[in-house]
């Protein structure tokens, strides 16, 4: 089954404790992206990747890092989480063509205390 | 800069009522347009998309949208909503030839049985 898999689904952590949210897709998609969803703000793009070893900042990249060492994986790293990073995070992927739709993972609800 | 506006933040309708959700975007070039739906507790799924051709596009579950270039709009419509359409709806715009997607802030639709 074609899918984007994120882990974990829920995560509660404390300020400053490094964490990684994993994302994997099995559709051989070139493009992958991370979004955060906050009430009243919709989805905002954090980082995206056009292909292996090619990444770029989205609209809200501060406090986040990403890597794309393999085509299928695109982890999101929070080196020193802060409470304002409490949010619902979605990973998404799509084919290379820019008129292709995004396929989303099931989301990761992160709480930073 | 690109932007997407969804004017209705919350909409409440009775079953069988007609639906129209507004979406306007700001971008001077060629765009790819999408509507996504997020059912409670789930990830976003594609409803429909437009990138060229007939400006009236039909999607899943009886939804349709019309691209009006002169108005920079891509409104979503459904002639008769059902209780199961209760969800949050997001309009998204991708600038053709780029890797960036911009999402609107979403419209929460509640359909009363």
Image (cartoon, rainbow, N blue to C red):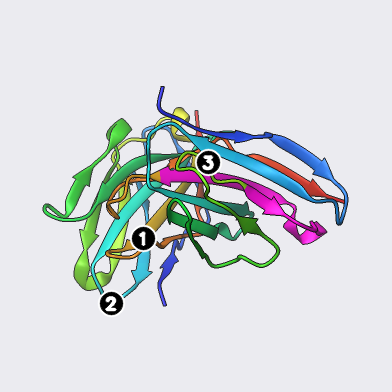
Discs 3 and 2 carry the same chain letter: no
Q: Are marks 3 and 1 in contact (CB under 8 Å)?
A: no
Q: Are marks 2 and 1 in contact (CB under 8 Å)?
A: no
Residue B40 visible, this angle? no
Q: Which of B24 and B96 lies nearest the eye of the viewer?
A: B96
Residue furthest to the left: B53
Q: Is residue A48 magenta?
A: no
Would you say residue A85 sits in the magenta stretch?
yes
Q: Secondary structure at mark 2?
A: loop
Residue A102 higher or lower than B104, as above or below: above
Q: CA separation, marks 2 and 1?
A: 12 Å
Q: Which residue is mark 1?
A: B93
Instruction: Tell me which residue sits at (37%, 37%) in the image.
Output: A28
Q: Secondary structure at mark 3?
A: loop
The chain containing the residue under callout 1 comes to: B
Q: Which mark is residue A73?
A: 3
Check disc 2 and report the residue beneath it: B28
Are the residues under badges 2 and 1 in a single subunit? yes
Read off the magenta span.
A76-93
- Out of B65 and A52, give the one closest to the viewer: A52
Residue B87 coordinates in the image, percent (x, y): 50, 39
Q: Quadrant of residue A5?
A: top right
């Amino acid at each position: 089954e074609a899918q984007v898999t994120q882990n974990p689904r829920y995560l509660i952590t404390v300020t400053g404790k490094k964490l990684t949210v994993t994302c994997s897709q099995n559709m051989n998609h070139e493009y992958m992206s991370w979004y955060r969803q906050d009430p009243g703000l919709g989805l905002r793009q954090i980082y995206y990747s056009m292909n292996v070893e090619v990444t770029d900042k989205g609209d809200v990249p501060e406090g986040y890092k990403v890597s794309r060492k393999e085509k299928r994986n695109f982890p999101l790293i929070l080196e020193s989480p802060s409470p304002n990073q409490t949010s619902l995070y979605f990973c998404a992927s799509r084919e290379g063509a820019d008129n292709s739709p995004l396929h989303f993972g099931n989301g990761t609800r992160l709480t930073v205390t | 800069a690109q932007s997407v506006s969804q004017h209705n933040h919350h909409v409440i309708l009775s079953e069988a009522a007609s639906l129209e959700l507004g979406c306007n975007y700001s971008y001077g070039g060629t765009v790819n347009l999408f509507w996504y739906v997020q059912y409670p507790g789930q990830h976003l799924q594609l409803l429909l998309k437009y990138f060229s051709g007939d400006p009236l596009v039909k999607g899943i579950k009886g939804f349709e949208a019309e691209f009006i270039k002169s108005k920079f709009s891509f409104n979503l419509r459904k002639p008769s909503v059902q209780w199961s359409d209760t969800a949050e709806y997001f309009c998204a715009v991708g600038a053709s030839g780029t890797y960036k997607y911009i999402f609107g802030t979403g419209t929460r639709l509640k359909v009363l049985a």
